[in-house]
Image (spheres, rainbow, N blue to C red):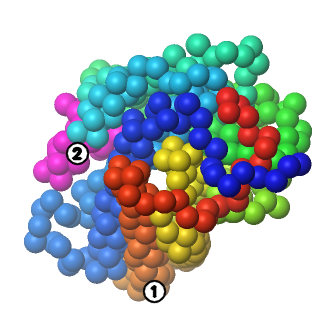
Amino acid sequence: MSSPSNNAEVTAVDTAGRWPLLLLLASGLSWLVISGVLALVASIQLHSPTFLTDCAWFTHGRVSAMAETSFVYGWAANAGLGLGLWILGRLGGSPLRALNWSVVGALFWNAGLTLGLIGIATGDATSFSLLQLPRYVQPLMVAAYAAIGVSGILAWNGRRTDGTHAAQWYAVAALFLFPWLLIAAQSMLLWSPVRGVLQAVTAGWYVQGVFTLWLAPLALAAAYYVVPKTTGRVYPSYEFAPLAFWTLIFVGAFTGGRHLIGGPVPAWIPTLANAACSLLLFHYLVVVLNLRSVFSAAGVAARFISVGLIAYFVSGSLDFITSFRGVALVTQFTYFAQAQQQLAVYGGISLLLFGAIYFAVPRLTGRAWASGAFVQGHMVLVLLGVALLVGSLGLAGWIQGHALNDAKVPFSAIAASTRPWLLAVTAAHGILLLANLLLLVNFARSVYSVCCSCSQAGELAFRQPSTMEAPTS
């Protein structure tokens, strides 16, 4: 293999879509910091209930809903869609078209999200997890999402090669499936509500679908594209990749019933979820086998993706383990469930997106990251923060679950026993907030240098691209 070039690979796809894609990434990173502030406030309130109690906008329920909403629909949505469009353009072999639609969609998406957060703060939130945005905002979000996705669909339909790539499958699936999920959930929970226990079943299906049919495909599209670029190797066991993809699409949403164990639902619903979780283990295993070469690769992008893959696999395994009724008796309705959620969306999804961002931004800007020290600082702090967050919540939940099952233990004693771990959770949120501020500042400096054309790219803070990186691959 010949020696790598001195500059990051920049193609016509990158230059043509530079500013719309950077707008999506900038929006995502901004919401990541905002969600971090809100999550920190909510965490403090868990062990110090009087914190901000005099302000109705920042009661714990509203702050938690705002933090969750801004993280999923602000950070993960903007970053995932930006990377998804970039990947579809590159693999399609031609510059992205109709990017004006994506820009308009991004502006309306973020404006709608801002309006929705104000609505949540003022008491207009719904009662359904991941669907807390007020009803008057959600149709706007559907229309905005459709506008953002136009460029990706055109890139898929106008691709110049007959063959397709795993990254394309996941990106296109996410573009199509999320609007269907959102419209179906809105119809069944808000506009023409189903009755009784069907609301809990629908809400559980939607929550699980957001992860398995939207966020996970966006993150996996990024991983499947970046890994061979950073390692210079083809995928091992790639013949199983289509089976893993279709397993996720057809089985993923059926695992939502694991949240209803012990609830007033037919027993077959949690049982079906347990079977679906076991089938989904095949998907997690194949993804790790396909991308395992990243574990021996160098560079910040590869390190983020390698840790993200481990977290993604472990989160899927925990979903399977906790879908058994005997385990759910301890873990359900405790901080352990929050630990699982954070492991999936922060440890799995976000770390994969971070790795792809560190790979994509130098190619979109044509320059290295402004500060290599900020890159290293962000990586160390975010990995430390995620480990502390998931570990503390998991231990707090395990203690809480066992104590709740003992009728002799008063609630005050349970709260006292979990308080030290909740303090650690607050520290973890503080570390993550600092880490993501470093990333946002570094991103802003990198983009500013392009806008002003006043600085020269220095030494690259990531592994140089190899000659296998074809301009349209």
Tell me if residue 279 comes above or below residue 173 in the rendering: below
Residue 369 lies left or right of residue 242; in this view the side is: left
Residue ID at (72%, 51%): 5
Q: Is disc 1 surrounded by few (<14), some (14 to 19) or many (20+) residues within 10 Å?
A: few
Coordinates of residue 179 in the picture (x, y in percent): 43, 25
Mark 2 touches mark 1? (CB < 8 Å): no
Say if the magenta span includes residue 119. Answer: yes
Observer-nearest of 214 and 29: 29
- Helix, strand or loop at mark 2: helix
Does residue 208 appear anywhere in the picture?
no
Type of the residue with mark 1: Pro
Q: Is residue 109 shown to the viewer in this render? A: yes
Q: Where residue 340 appears, x then y in whole percent? A: 57, 59
Residue displayed at 21% across by 77% down: 51
Circle number at residue 420: 1
Horizontal side of residue 100 vs 404, given as left or right: left
Residue drawn at the location 39% of the way across and 52% of the way down: 453
Categorize mark 2 by other alpha carbons within 10 Å: few (<14), some (14-19), many (20+): some
Q: Is residue 121 left or right of residue 391?
A: left
Q: Name the residue that disc number 2 marks.
A: 114
As measured in the structure, the alpha-carbon distance from the residue carrying label 2 to the one carrying label 1 is 34 Å
Residue type of the residue flagged with mark 2: Thr
Label 2 or label 1, whichever comes before in sequence order: 2
In the displayed structure, 298 sits above or below 393; it is: above
Q: How many marks?
A: 2
Q: Which residues are magenta?
A: 112-138
Q: Is residue 471 magenta?
A: no
- Residue 382, image x, y percentages: 53, 69
Could you tell whether 369 is left or right of 448 in the image? right
The image's mark for residue 213 is none
Mark 1 lies on a secondary structure that is: helix
Q: Nearer the viewer, mark 2 or mark 1?
A: 2
